[in-house]
Amino acid sequence: MLYAVTIENAHRFGDVLPQLLRLRYKQFRERQGYDVRVFREMEFDQYDTPETVYLVRLDEQKRVQGTSRLNSTLSPYMLREIWPHLVEGHELPRAAEVWEGTRICVDKALPAAARERIKWEIVLGYLEFGLGNGIARYIGIMQSFIWRRVFIQSGWGAEFLGPEHAIDGIKTRAGQVQVSRDALQRVRETTGIFEPVLANPGEVRTGLAKAA
């Protein structure tokens, strides 16, 4: 099941926070060679804060199988502070209803079918969490193939905020996705996952009114 995890409710899920940071270490430092901050094989940066919400896929033994990080654009966020040059012809938002999504990863040790399912659950989790918390859209910077294989292939689609740039030799771009019930239905139809995937969509306090 997928859970919205914060510093306030993490105690309910065992050692979920160090687990997800270790999974990120394996994905972004070991596999992709990113120059990211590491401590005891945990990857983290300045955007992992008490305000951060993590979407986390846990198995029955509370082992982390996949995760993504969400931050409100009212707080400092990656695209605005580090990669603003990737955005052309658009204002970088600072609004309660706009959040940034980063650090999507799935445990590569899992079978391919399981990884595919978890990938789609994370996409659905974005939508369910957004609808449960008054979020209108997500923005982010991701490798171009991630936009294609995760958001576009899910049926959600994406609007790009600027052209591709090569970062460490990999095509990368900024984009955004709109949160709506129509988008949720499209993703459910594309992925074949019709049941809710997020166990606690309205539990985390974001300061936003829930969607009707």
Image: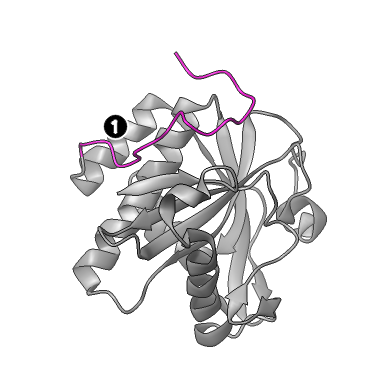
Q: Is residue 149 above or below residue 50?
A: below
The structure residue drawn at horizontal position 70% and vertical position 52%, both measured from the top left corner, is 49
Few, some or many residues within 10 Å of mark 1 (<14, 14–19, 20+): some
Q: Is residue 196 above or below residue 41?
A: above
Q: Which quarter of the rendered picture does the C terminus lie within? A: top left
The structure residue drawn at horizontal position 29% and vertical position 32%, both measured from the top left corner, is 185
Q: Is residue 207 visible to the viewer in this orientation of the structure?
A: yes
Q: Determine whether, in the image, residue 85 is placed left or right of residue 200.
A: right
Verify whether residue 205 appears in magenta.
yes
Verify whether residue 182 appears in magenta.
no
The structure residue drawn at horizontal position 37% and vertical position 72%, both measured from the top left corner, is 107
What secondary structure is found at the residue carrying circle 1?
A: helix
Q: Is residue 87 visible to the viewer in this orientation of the structure?
A: no
The structure residue drawn at horizontal position 40% and vertical position 57%, both measured from the top left corner, is 150
Most frequent secondary structure within the magenta stretch: loop
Q: Which residue is mark 1?
A: 185
Q: Which of these two is toward me, 166 or 129?
A: 129
x and y percent of residue 136 in the render? 56, 28
Residue 188 occupies quadrant: top left
Q: Which residues are magenta?
A: 194-212
